[in-house]
Amino acid sequence: MSEWFTVENIEALEAQYRTLGPLIGILFPFLESFLPFLPLVVFVVANASSHGLWFGFLLSWVGTVLGSYSVFLLVRRFGNNRKVQQFIKYEKMQKLIQWVDMKGIAPLFLLLCFPFTPSVLVNIVAGLSNIKKKYYFVVLLAGKCVMILTISLLGYDIGALLRSPTKLVLVIVAIFLLWIIGKQIERYLNKRVERELKEVSRLRKNKKLKITYKD
């Protein structure tokens, strides 16, 4: 099955169903979020080749963000299921969840930036952690943007990049700027999370003092 998923086959499929091309471009990255054995890199490169660099990037980005966030929401919704709870009890999974709760969104953002990170595991751990939905959505947008654009830029026409030092430098600069923007978003969200944690801690402390005083 994996042998069928090549850039040429995906491009041929999108050409054959041209009217559904954009939907197919979104569908495959979406499915990869649920089926990690599918080759995301192939889908991203095929989208860039079939639809052009920027529109192909947009299709891949939308598909993978929607898929990843869907996995996150499903885990968050059914986290109390008995089978899911059995999965959570594994020591390694407990350590990952505690690690995310302690470190916040910074490691999640970095993991999502790398193409070969098992994103389905990241989505599951995030869903089982205490991270807020809106924060994880922003982290997904930023992290997946860096990852998908990097793959699109490198896979769109790698031969032309190697032949043109100017284009190669521009690609490197673009990736670096995206990384800087992502780090700024990461810092902003981390500060928000820290403020909320301090507020929750303060409220709990006040509540405990009131109860102690009443006793």
Image (cartoon, rainbow, N blue to C red):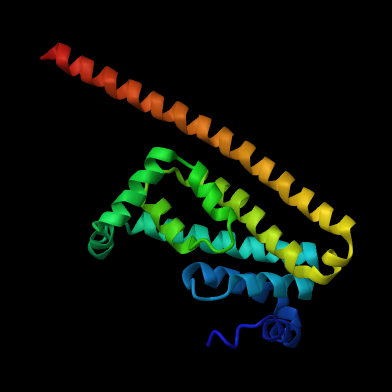
Give the side of residue 77 with respect to residue 105, left or right.
left
Is residue 157 visible to the viewer in this orientation of the structure? no
Q: In the image, residue 66 lies at what x, y percent? A: 56, 61
Residue 139 visible in this rendered orientation of the protein: yes
In the orientation shown, which residue stands out farthest toward the top? 213
State the image coordinates of residue 69 (x, y, percent, origin top left).
51, 57
The residue shown at (43%, 61%) is 121
In the figure, residue 20 lies in which quadrant? bottom right
The image shows residue 82, relative to residue 98, as above or below, that is below
Left of 61 or right of it: where is 201? left
How many marks the image carries: the answer is: 0
Q: Quadrant of residue 72?
A: bottom left
Q: Position of residue 173 (x, y in %)?
A: 78, 48
- In the rendering, at what x and y percent does residue 182 appear? 64, 43
Which residue is more in the foreground, 94 or 78?
94
Q: Left or right: 185 with respect to 52? A: left
Q: Residue furthest left?
A: 215
Quadrant in which the C terminus is drawn: top left
Instruction: Identify which residue, 33 or 204, lies in the foreground.
Output: 33
x 52%, y 30%: residue: 191
Is residue 11 shown left or right of residue 204? right
Determine whether 190 is above or below 116 in the image: above
Which residue appears at 77% of the width and 64% of the height? 55
